[in-house]
Structure formats: structure tokens, C-alpha cells
Image (cartoon, grey):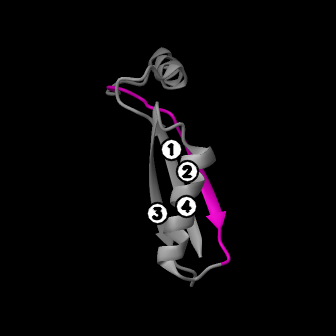
Amino acid sequence: MKVEIHTTLKQGVLDPQGKAVESALKNLGFSGIREIRQGKLFNIDMETEDPKKAKDLALKICEVLLANMVIEDYKIKIIKNT
């Protein structure tokens, strides 16, 4: 089973990478951009085919390593194998 984990900085936490991209796009003439927030996407191929087990493992992985719980939020998406 495949799992996607997307981590982003919490609202209110300064995002220097997002600000740098936002500034660069504006300098290149792009308009209509209110804000850019940078994040990370992790694609994990798990051995289990049980969605609950996959989500439980993904939660543990986020809490232990992938997400800094103080400044980051995360979203988990379970993708069933086809």
C-alpha cells in the first residue's frame, strides 16, 4: 500500500523558503500570488495492504521523524495499490 505524507509549516510560523519563492516569482513578473508556503512530500510504499495499519504506521512515522510537531502540520493520504 502506498502512503503520501505532506508536511507544512503551521500558520504563523515564518516560512523563509516560501517567501523566497514568492519574491522570485514577483520579480519575474508573476502577479496574483497572495502567499506561498513550502512543504515536503514523502511517498512511502508499505508492505501492508491494510489501510488502518498503513495509517497507524504513517502516524507513528510522522510523530517520530517526519514532522516537527511544534512547528509543522502533516496530512496522510492512503493510496490503495491497483
Q: Residue at x 48, y 16 (%)?
A: 23
Q: Nearer the viewer, mark 2 or mark 1?
A: 2
In the image, the segment drawn in magenta is: 34-47
Name the residue nearer the viewer: 55 or 29.
Answer: 55
Circles 3 and 2, Cβ within 8 Å, touching? The answer is no
Query: Real-space Cα distance between discs 3 and 1?
Result: 12 Å
Q: Residue at x 56, y 57 (%)?
A: 60
Kindly identify which numbered label has been placed on residue 7. 1
SS class of the residue under badge 1? strand
Query: Real-space Cα distance between discs 3 and 2?
Result: 13 Å
Q: Residue 13 is drawn in which quadrant?
A: top left
| Residue 47 percent across, percent down from the top left | 68, 77
The crowd level at tag 4 (other Cα within 10 Å; few <14, some 14-19, many 20+) is many
- Vertical side of 33 occupied by 51: above or below: below
Circles 2 and 4, Cβ within 8 Å, touching? The answer is yes
Q: Nearer the viewer, mark 4 or mark 1?
A: 4
Callout 2 amino acid:
Cys
Q: Nearer the viewer, mark 3 or mark 2?
A: 2
| Residue 4 percent across, percent down from the top left | 54, 60
- Vertical side of 48 occupied by 72: above or below: above
Query: Real-space Cα distance between discs 3 and 4?
Result: 9 Å
Question: Which residue is denoted by mark 2 in the rendering?
Answer: 62
SS class of the residue under badge 4? helix
- Vertical side of 22 occupied by 43: above or below: below
| Residue 67 percent across, percent down from the top left | 54, 42
Circles 3 and 4, Cβ within 8 Å, touching? The answer is no
